[in-house]
Image: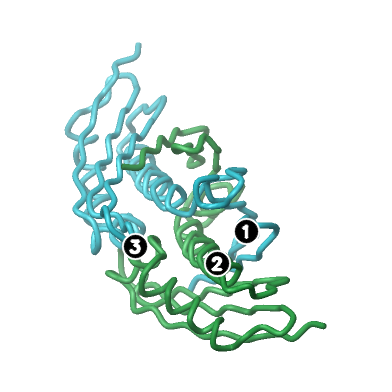
Chain colours: A cyan, B green
């Protein structure tokens, strides 16, 4: 189980906490009456997917003794035109920087994350078609 | 479209930003090698659902001239035992505090959020069975 509590602070601003105890603020853009003081809930979902898969990829590559110096993940989420504007497609791009990174290890770590380990990705994949790509930036 | 970028900071810690420009830090618990310095990605998803639906409920009740003084949302997410431990069930409880709140208006606002407006809920409902409940706390 995972538990969370979200409390109204002001206007459309909410603060959430969950099992780990860390607080996160959420807000809505001005166009729908919010004050744009924090990430929107849909942004959190997109970022959570990147963080979740990024943690997998880093962990797996560490086990494979790969020297990952940086990992940047770019996400594009396509939403349906009509309410409730849910995610219908997502693309996740992994940009890995490191010394002598094995492309095979990188490919495999991404595959393991997306097909086996990433909880957020697995949850989202029931709603959205997920595609991915990667780039390796060499660093000496 | 929604865009986000997530960058490795250190160990399993990532910082994400999306279209609104606000940054969110994510981390993993110590049990999987993280440092528990921030919310986990799965926590963000659960909180995002609460924030998303909470914003709907507050907006709708405001339009209905209801005097909502506080809204607390409690979320329970059940995860699958096996990898990737995705959400399979979620319960969302709305605790509304206000003066002369109409139960009919409260019920209707929750229904509209869950069935029509909440993007995060709609996305998650493809993976998890979502149930809900509410409590109204009277305040003079």
Secondary structure under the numbered disc 1 in the rendered image: strand
Element under disc 2? helix
Question: Would you identify the image quadrant in which residue B117 lies?
Answer: bottom left
Q: Along the horizontal axis of the image, is B63 left or right of A90?
A: right
In the rendered image, the vertical position of residue B106 relative to residue A131, given as above or below = below
Q: Earlier in the sequence, mark 3 or mark 1?
A: 1
- Bin the neighbour count of mark 3 within 10 Å (Cα to Cα): few under 14, some 14-19, many 20 and up: some
Foreground mark, 3 or 1, reads: 3
In the rendered view, tell whether residue B39 sits above or below residue A131: below
Q: Position of residue A28 (x, y in %)?
A: 54, 50
Residue under mark 1: which chain is it in? A
Q: Quadrant of the N terminus of chain B?
A: top left
Pointer 2: what residue? B54
Residue nearest the observer in this picture, A116 or A129: A129
In the rendered structure, the answer to whether residue A136 lies left or right of residue B39 reads left
Q: Which mark is residue A14?
A: 1
* Image x and y of residue A130, in percent: 21, 50
Q: What residue is disc 3 on?
A: A84
Residue A5, compared with residue A129, is above or below; it is below
Q: Is residue B72 visible?
A: yes
Residue plotted at (30% across, 45% down): A77
Identify which residue is drawn at 70% across, 74% down. B67
**Label 1: few (<14), some (14–19) or many (≥20) C-alpha neighbours in 10 Å:** many
Q: Disc 2 versus disc 1: distance between alpha carbons?
A: 8 Å
Residue, x 47% and y 79% (percent of image)? B91
Q: Tell me the distance, in whole angstroms, between the alpha carbons under discs 3 and 1.
A: 20 Å
Q: Is residue B86 visible?
A: no
């Amino acid at each position: 189980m995972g538990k969370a509590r979200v409390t109204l602070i002001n206007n459309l601003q909410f603060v959430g906490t969950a099992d780990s105890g860390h607080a996160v603020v959420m807000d809505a853009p001005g166009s729908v009456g919010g004050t744009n003081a924090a990430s929107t809930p849909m942004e959190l979902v997109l970022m959570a997917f990147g963080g979740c898969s990024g943690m997998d990829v880093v962990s797996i590559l560490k086990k494979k003794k790969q020297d990952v110096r940086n990992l940047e993940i770019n996400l594009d989420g396509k939403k349906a035109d009509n309410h409730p504007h849910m995610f219908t497609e997502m693309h996740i791009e992994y940009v890995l920087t490191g010394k002598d990174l094995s492309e095979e290890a990188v490919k495999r770590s991404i595959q393991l994350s997306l097909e086996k380990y990433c909880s957020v990705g697995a949850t989202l994949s029931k709603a959205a078609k997920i595609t991915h790509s990667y780039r390796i930036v060499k660093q000496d």
